[in-house]
Amino acid sequence: MIAQMCERFGIGGRIRDAALAAYERTAALVYPAQATVALNVLQAFIAEGLVESDFAGTTGYGYDDVSRAKYESLLARVLGAQRAIARLSIVSGTQAIVAALAACTPPGKTLLSISGLPYDTLRNAICEAPHSLVSQGVAYREIGLRADGTVDTDASSRSAAELVDPTVFIQRSRGYAPRPSLCVAECERAVTAVKRVAPSALVLVDNCYGELVEEREPTHVGADLVMGSLIKNFGGSIAPAGAYVAGRSDLLERVAARLFAPGLGDAIGPTLGTGRALCQGLFLAPAIVEQSLRGLDFIAALFETLGYPVDPKPGARRTDIVQAVRLGSEDKLRRFAGGLQAAMPVNARFRPEPASVPGYAEPVLMSSGAFVSGATIELSCDAPLRPPFEVYVQGGVSIAHAYLGALFAARACETSG
């Protein structure tokens, strides 16, 4: 396929040679966790017992929305959680995370991040934005990761033990930071260490980009809540909108009061006829996630062959659907994003330009041509214009599209002038 693509789109020389080498290096890779993930999702659907009428949904307030109830039950089964809230009205993973953090950390209590600096928009919402959690009386502490990218469990335990009923936050994915993403086993190690010295501490995990990549989820290993987006991994490129919070039932009551209104619980929220797409997206999600992992390994191999530092390395264990490529300059970032954009199924004729984005200190450059706006399970990239000028590539619904996007991005980066 790579040779055929290069011939059709006029890609030759060094890029073609590197692409063929990358294909040889990655085509036979296997992803053993994905077999278990697929079985987990299939088992959830069989246990749930969906019927055609479950997809009807509601409008208005959404009372007695069977479609919503079935979908949330499916998510809870897959996540190993007591309960889940998944709504179109929760428009982003950031909204879900902030709602959960606020619900679990009342004024006067402490939010302790033990995975270092949260991603830009989240830290802004916690610390700096108008009406931030800190401005409302929440105390905030932060513990950096160790040099090897793992959680500093000693420092985390000491800090948690000093606090009364803290909320401990873990971010699995790297965000816009040059650090490794965290695997579920590392989350388990951190949860165990914190709970040993502070049994009443609540551990909340930002699960964005990590769902269905490993055999287990953080809720399987002791996390009290996990939060994420429905238009990333779980959406399977079909879910049209939404985000979720899942975990302990009593904590979900707090989150529901924060999201809706005290006393209403989670009894409202129409699916507006999207129940079929939500459920079908979840059904397809394991296959789509595997396609993403395959595509990202090819991108890593191609750019490493061309001399760029990449993380993760091709063939290394992956814990999310994000690939970092260190391009080293703003010019290369612009070229990469423009090349990737040219391969998009939607808006390929547009050229990405850096712009100010709420919550980010520097301009951000993004490339996306998704059928669902912002659905980063579809192939996309983004990067803040700051050293070390890393670009973060996400998703990829089909391996063929990932190949083509990588070839176009590489050609753009390596073209002189």
Image: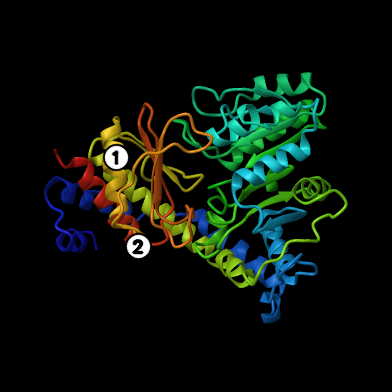
Relative to 408, is 112 on the left or the right? right
Question: Residue, x 14% and y 45% (percent of image)?
Answer: 14
Whole-number angstrom distance, CA of label 1 to CA of label 2: 19 Å
Q: Position of residue 93 (x, y in %)?
A: 60, 47
Q: Position of residue 11 (x, y in %)?
A: 16, 54
Residue type marked 1 = Arg
Residue 199, above or below 18 = above
Residue 377, above or below 196 = below
As helix, strand or loop, the secondary structure at mark 2 comes to loop
Question: Residue, x 37% and y 32% (percent of image)?
Answer: 385
Question: Residue, x 61% and y 72% (percent of image)?
Answer: 276
Judging depth in this view, the residue of 65 and 84 nearest the camera is: 65
Disc 1: which residue: 334
Disc 2: which residue: 345
Judging depth in this view, the residue of 213 and 361 nearest the camera is: 361
Judging depth in this view, the residue of 77 and 385 nearest the camera is: 385
Residue 143, above or below 19 = above
Q: Give the label on residue 268, or none.
A: none
Which quarter of the image is occupied by the C terminus? top left
Classify mark 2: residues with Cα within 10 Å, few (<14), some (14-19) or many (20+): some
Q: Position of residue 297 (x, y in %)?
A: 37, 48
Question: Residue, x 19% and y 41% (percent of image)?
Answer: 414
Which quarter of the image is occupied by the N terminus? bottom left
As helix, strand or loop, the secondary structure at mark 1 comes to helix
Residue type marked 2 = Pro
> Which one is earlier in the sequence, the residue at label 1 or at label 2?
1
